[in-house]
Image (cartoon, rainbow, N blue to C red):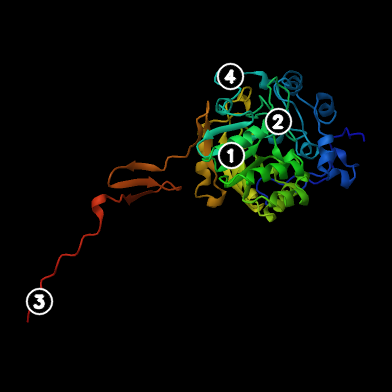
Amino acid sequence: MQLEESSSRDEPPLAGLSSKQFISPGKGHWRDVSDADWNDHRWQLQHRLTNLNQISALLRLTPEEEAGFKLSGHKLATAITPYFFNLVEADDPGGPIRRQVIPRIEETHTARWEMTDPCGEDNHSPVPGLVHRYPDRVLLLVTDRCAAYCRYCTRSRLVSGASDYDFHPKIEQALAYIREHHEVRDVLISGGDPLLLSDEKLDWLLGRLRNIRHVELVRIGSRIPIFLPQRITPELCATLRKHHPLWLSIHTNHPRECTLEMKAACERLSDAGIPLGNQSVLLRDVNDDPATMKALLQKLLMMRVRPYYIYQCDLITGSAHLRSSVSRGLEIMESLRGHTTGYAVPQYVIDAPGGGGKVPVSPEYVVYRDEERVIFRNYEGKVFEYPETLPDAAPQPAKPRPIETA
């Protein structure tokens, strides 16, 4: 099957930021592919765009992008599913989707504060593939592959196989560790993307975790509903449904990603009883303005996805060109609180460099506080006072009144 070289498309343009519609990107360059193939996740994976020649035949690249393909591949491979490639802005090198998946020469630049393991996962890994950083929960990394690769990936040291990092998770050892540590009640399965595993492997893994009595909650982190919604089949949903309580965190950064296909995938997961949360990364010229972020969060709610986190971009090497400022993040958070439903307001966090864990960051609403009162402002800037409850502020018995005599 030959790819179309023209960038023109027959499908309607994607919805604008203020639109509540969900529009499909269509087949685009692959318009001659059968519906059966196009909607098959295996076909999508087999036809990913992975090199300069493939992508330059479909997209006019800038010199910075061409150089990025040639020089950054040793750090993180390139892979884009045909479905997701149809969201890439053909005429805008600074487009928010394009910035996320097309490499640039800036990825080879390392700022002095950047790190290959910014979250300190390797220092908290008692077993290969397992990270135990918080008291009652662990991170289980089960694969180093994704359907497509985000250029700001915090695990670019181990994901995609492009670097020389030796990643070989020891699943049986990890399960034994979890079984022996009774304080672990929550397991987050990630990678790479765990939903690239077959239904049978997921069933086996989830079943093993469910057999550990002190594991109360299992979560999966995935960008498959965004990069490869065709993978969210009825069969996969039936497999996942067997292992409740099971939660799924997806990763959506921009309203353009919220297509009909993604919406349908999320609805299938929700109908299987799986609560969905979203984690966005604050990215420069992608979603670091209030209008874009608000549109994204509101669209997520319409797909039954609860906004969960906005992450400050980790200090991964080669990500400075994509990293927005904390002050910008705080401005966005202030633009959300009180201006949209609370369900659409996620928590803004910084994953403390070196392994300190997630730290919430929020605008300052408390103006003054002492033992007697708290003075605070609301989203409109109006100031209010609320009394503190003091130990000696308990209601006192009423004083006896004098008895009136005739």
The residue beneath circle 2 is 144
Q: Give the residue drawn at x 14%, y 68%.
A: 400
Give 11 or 170, whichever is nearer the viewer.
Answer: 170
In what element is the residue under mark 1? helix
Label located before the other in sequence (3 or 2): 2
Task: Report the Cα–Cα distance between label 3 and label 2.
Answer: 87 Å
Single out the mark in the foreground, 4 or 2.
2
Amino acid bearing label 2: Asp
- Mark 3 touches mark 1? (CB < 8 Å): no
Q: Nearer the viewer, residue 212 or 244?
A: 212
**SS at mark 2 in the image:** loop
Asked if residue 256 is positioned above or below residue 302 in the image, the reply reads above
Q: CA distance from mark 1 to mark 2?
A: 24 Å
Q: Between marks 3 and 1, how big is the CA–CA gap? A: 75 Å
Q: Earlier in the sequence, mark 3 or mark 4?
A: 4
**Alpha-carbon span between mark 3 and mark 4:** 85 Å
Give percent across and percent down for residue 108: 67, 19
Q: What residue would you read off at disc 3? A: 404
Q: Residue type at mark 4?
A: Ala
Q: Nearer the viewer, mark 1 or mark 2?
A: 1
Q: Identify the image quadrant of the C terminus.
A: bottom left
**Residue type (three-letter) at the residue carrying disc 3:** Glu
List x then y, in percent, for residue 298: 61, 49
Give whichever of discs 1 and 2 has the lower sequence position: 2
Q: Nearer the viewer, residue 27 or 379?
A: 27
Quarter of the figure with the N terminus: top right
Q: Which residue is mark 1?
A: 179
How far apart, in angstroms, are the residues tagged by discs 4 and 2? 25 Å
Query: Could you tell me the amino acid type at mark 1?
Result: Arg
- Locate residue 330 relative to residue 307 in the image: left or right: left
